[in-house]
Image: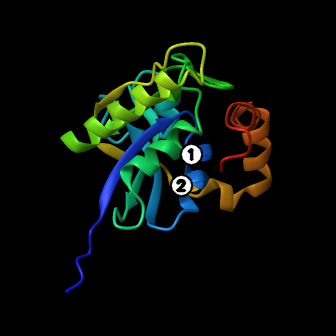
Amino acid sequence: MTENKQEIATFAGGCFWCMVKPFDQFPGILKVISGYTGGHKENPTYEEVCTETTGHREAVQITFDPRIISYEQLLDIFWQQIDPTDAGGQFYDRGTSYQTAIFYHSPEQKEKAERSKQALEASKKFKKPIVTPIIPAATFYEAEDYHQKYYQKNPVRYEAYHQGSGRANFIKTHWGKNHE
């Protein structure tokens, strides 16, 4: 009997447009959804989240098969997409809705995320402290359809944004190549 095992991981890494493609391309990733989480407003819209009054962060929720790709591998991919030393947002995007976070769904995910963060800190890859918080998962609200798989629906605008925001250059500078 084959067990259909799926787990969920949730990461906030700034603009969710730039956080889908890096995960979408790996075997074992079953689904990547752009959305909002961590705030107090039920069913927020993109416009509401952009006002910085909902408490939500733009995030991605990843459904994955841990027999094919581990949570630790997802953490590695996540760290290589963000500036973990920036508490004010990510790259061009500023404010709480663009702050990074790892939202854990179980005590095991929390432990693995904390170990991963400690290892990144110990690596001295960054001169400043790693400030990405590790917090309990909250209700995840799926973003509007036009935000889903943005890199596929609008490849030219996506690439211009990915480059223009400073994210692509940051990844290349800190990880030696484009990790998406």
Task: Give percent across and percent down for residue 93.
Answer: 63, 26
Q: What residue is at 19 percent from the left and 40 percent from the top?
A: 107
The total number of labels drawn is: 2
Q: Find the distance from the CA under tag 1 to the CA under tag 2.
A: 7 Å
Residue farthest to the top, as pictured: 128
Q: Left of 141 or right of it: where is 146?
A: right
Q: What residue is at 26 percent from the left and 36 percent from the top?
A: 111
Residue where numbered disc 1 is placed: 19
- Of residues 57 and 168, which is closer to you in this image? 168
- Of residues 33 and 70, which is closer to you in this image? 70
Element at badge 2? helix
**Which of the two discs, 1 and 2, sits closer to the camera?**
2
Task: Give percent across and percent down for residue 156.
Answer: 80, 53
Identify the disc placed on residue 23.
2
* Quadrant of the image occupied by residue 6: bottom left
* Quadrant of the image occupied by residue 119: top left
Amino acid under disc 2 = Phe
As drawn, 32 above or below 114: below
Q: What residue is at 44 percent from the left and 63 percent from the top?
A: 31
As drawn, 174 above or below 17: above
- Of residues 51 and 161, which is closer to you in this image? 161
Amino acid under disc 1 = Met
Element at badge 1? helix
As drawn, 153 above or below 118: below
- Of residues 13 and 128, which is closer to you in this image? 128
Task: Give percent across and percent down for residue 18.
Answer: 62, 44
Q: Left of 40 or right of it: where is 89?
A: right
Regarding residue 51, the answer to whether it shows in the image is: no
Check whether the beta carbons of the residues at disc 1 and disc 2 lie within 8 A of each other: yes
